[in-house]
Amino acid sequence: MLFSIIIPLYNRPQEIKELLETLVLQTYKQFEVLVIEDGSVKDAAAIVDSFTDKLNVRYFVKPNEGQGFARNFGFERAEGDYFIIFDSDCLIPPDYLETVNNSLQSNWLDAYGGPDDAHPSFTPIQKAISYSMTSPFTTGGIRGNKKGIGQFHPRSFNMGISRQVWEKAGGFIITRLGEDIEYSIRIHSMGFKIGLIPDAKVYHKRRTSFYQFYKQLHFFGRARINIYKFFPGSLKLVHFFPAGFTLLLAFTLVSNMLMWPVAILCNFLLAVLILLIFFHAWSKNKSVKVAFLSIIAAFIQLTAYGLGFIQDFWKRVIFKQS
């Protein structure tokens, strides 16, 4: 089976260099790479060209339209039997393609997703963010988990679809704001078999600062409402958890300032959550520093997602604004 690896790229030349270096080391060699430069100011032409003697790689430049439509551009030009999507800030383990190929041979999936993890080379903040996005104490616990609530929806940082899916379902119809979840639900609705390949993990750098992480998660919260507008039945109780946490946090601050008795209970609940995150993150990363940073990352994740969710729920669901 020939895999076509499709990577949208926007102003991140150093990231694509590191990603391509990991693809050179793949134990399974039947693959091509398509790098789609999506209207970048800082292009990676020279960097990609330096890999042409090591990889079957093609480089394309197009006007900026966002990652969803950049992936469609790659789908249209891919020659493989199976298309794999990576974000440019991922590092790929050497046995990734071999793992996927073996899994598809034994248990065919029309589309799949894989989990992500922190690489040892990541900074403490990156490790804390990675922990938060995969922790059972935040909404990240439902990502890359067979036991997640409802249908499994592959995420586009580590996702694969067969050529048959592309030919029948087409590509992404929105380019941002939850485009991968919309695509997954649409593939499900057409009767294709979708699942998780647990061992097909990537190392996902995500964001390098808490400020960038906040902006990303605020966007994710808004994206959940965007998906709701396409598929109202996709909104589950778990998606309201960050908004509930954000409101609880605000109520706790007010009750402490006004010295309401209920503040004692609120403080206790938050203290329990902080301790759970700290010791769980410590056990996972074997670092006290990362454990402390994980508390910050978790609170940023929940409040940023919650605020984005509340913002667009209020505007688009309550007031029916476009």
Image (cartoon, helix red, strand yellow):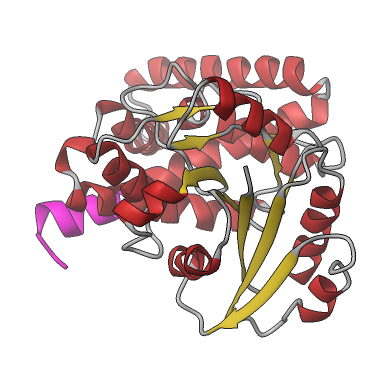
Q: Classify residue 5 as left or right of residue 185.
A: right
Q: Position of residue 122 (x, y in %)?
A: 81, 43
Is any part of residue 218 visible from this angle?
yes
Query: Image quadrant of residue 110?
Result: top left
Residue closest to the eye, 266 or 286? 286
Which residue is painted at 50% across and 80% down in the image?
A: 64
Query: Image quadrant of residue 266?
Result: top left
Q: Quadrant of the C terminus?
A: bottom left
Q: Position of residue 71 (x, y in %)?
A: 50, 63
Q: Classify residue 35 as left or right of residue 108.
A: right
Which residue is painted at 31% across and 24% down in the image?
A: 150
Which residue is painted at 26% across and 34% down in the image?
A: 191
Query: Main SS type for the magenta part?
Result: helix
Q: Position of residue 12 (x, y in %)?
A: 71, 69
Q: Would you say residue 1 sits in the magenta stretch?
A: no
Which residue is painted at 57% across and 35% down in the image?
A: 133
Q: Would you say residue 313 sits in the magenta stretch?
A: yes
Magenta segment: 308-322
Is any part of residue 222 visible from this angle?
no
Q: Quadrant of the N terminus?
A: top right
Residue closest to the eye, 265 or 89? 89
